Amino acid sequence: MGLFRYPGGKQRISTEIIKYLHNQLSTQTTHYIEPFVGAGGILLPFLKTKPALDCIHLNDLDYSIYCVWWSVYNSPNLLCSWLESFYPTVDTFYRYKEDLQNVSPDHPKVEVAMRKIALHQMSFSGLGEMGGPIGGKEQRGRWGVGCRWNIKRLCARVNETHSLLSRYHVVLTNKCFFDTIGIYKNALHYCDPPYFEKGNQLYKSGMTLEEHVKLFSTLSHSDNWVLSYDNVPTIVELYKDKHIYNIDVKYSVGEEKNSRKKSKELVITSHEFTS
Ligand SMILES: C[S@@+](CC[C@H](N)C(=O)[O-])C[C@H]1O[C@@H](n2cnc3c(N)ncnc32)[C@H](O)[C@@H]1O
């Protein structure tokens, strides 16, 4: 489970991915980097396994995401008091959406973080700036804009995340992935870029074909990494010389227990998996 609602969350396959991360950890590994941290859907369960590391480096190109991690790490109490003073409405949904589309480093980080979390909690499928409010503009749907607002649970997650991070030296950045890969000597990287096919519909910061190729060439020059992607021919072709593993995700469509519909995600690693 990530810090807040965010699209493309890997909770269904987090146990699998963490297995690959542990496979690549060695006694020499001192740094763990997530160049595409998002809401930390893998980071948090991974940190709960108490990996022996010195430094955690979290990066995302979306400035509001950077503000969320900055606030959770540096100012969790203030963030929670901002969240506690918030009440979800359709009007605030649209106001926050506009504010965050035009956000800049001049805005106070904790206020940006509160708006980012609130917007995603109020949005359909957790899409934030990329979607509409739960229940629609007219609130004619079965569920209303505030149906995912559970302040106790949110603040508990903020505080738990703060204490998980406090065990380490933490570096937070708001850069392109390119500037965060391969910068430490003994580092493990977990890369979860936007999906190749649908990523640009899900995130405020998407990636072009050239950027996906640049990620490939950056990783090719880097030592220790685990990468998750959608299972599409371009990605399989690009990474054909690396170690590619298929992960089955069972979708319980409409929560039907025996649904057979499956979708494959890929985990690609720099080192072969040894069980
Ligand atoms: C698939 S999501 C990560 C989801 C995350 N693992 C989670 O559990 O929430 C991809 C993230 O990459 C970020 N991103 C997009 N382009 C980027 C770039 N060029 N450099 C760094 N981050 C980028 C997006 O803002 C988004 O948060």
Image (cartoon, helix red, strand yellow):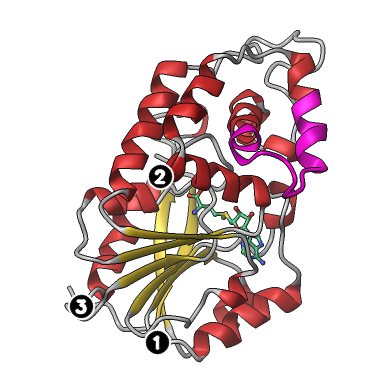
Q: Is residue 196 above or below residue 166?
A: below
Of pointers 2 and 3, the one earlier in the residue sequence: 2
Q: Residues within 10 Å of mark 1 (few under 14, many from 20)?
A: some
Where, by quadrant of the figure, is residue 224 drawn? Answer: bottom left
> To which residue does mark 3 refer?
26
What residue is disc 1 on? 223
Instruction: Report crowding for label 3: few under 14, some 14 to 19, many 20 or more residues within 10 A (C-alpha).
Output: few
Q: What is the C-alpha distance between the residues marked 2 and 1?
A: 26 Å
Crowding near pointer 2: few (<14 within 10 Å), some, many (20+)?
some
The structure residue drawn at horizontal position 61% and vertical position 26%, both measured from the top left corner, is: 118
Asked if the stretch drawn in magenta spans residue 109, the answer is: yes
Helix, strand or loop status at disc 3: loop
Q: Which amino acid type is shown beneath numbered disc 2? A: Gln
Q: Residue at x 51, y 30 (%)?
A: 79
Residue 198 visible in image: no
Residue 193: percent from the left, percent from the top?
58, 63
Q: What segment is highlighted magenta in the picture?
A: 95-113
255 w.r.t. 31: above or below: above
Q: Residue at x 39, y 39 (%)?
A: 1
- The location of residue 37, given as percent across then percent down, is 51, 56
Identify the secondary structure beneath mark 1: loop
Q: Quadrant of ligand 1?
A: bottom right
> Which dot, 2 or 1, sits closer to the camera?
1
The disc at residue 11 is 2
Left or right: 12 with respect to 65?
A: left
Q: CA distance from mark 1 to mark 3?
A: 13 Å
* Of residues 152 and 224, the one drawn nearer to the viewer in this rendering: 152
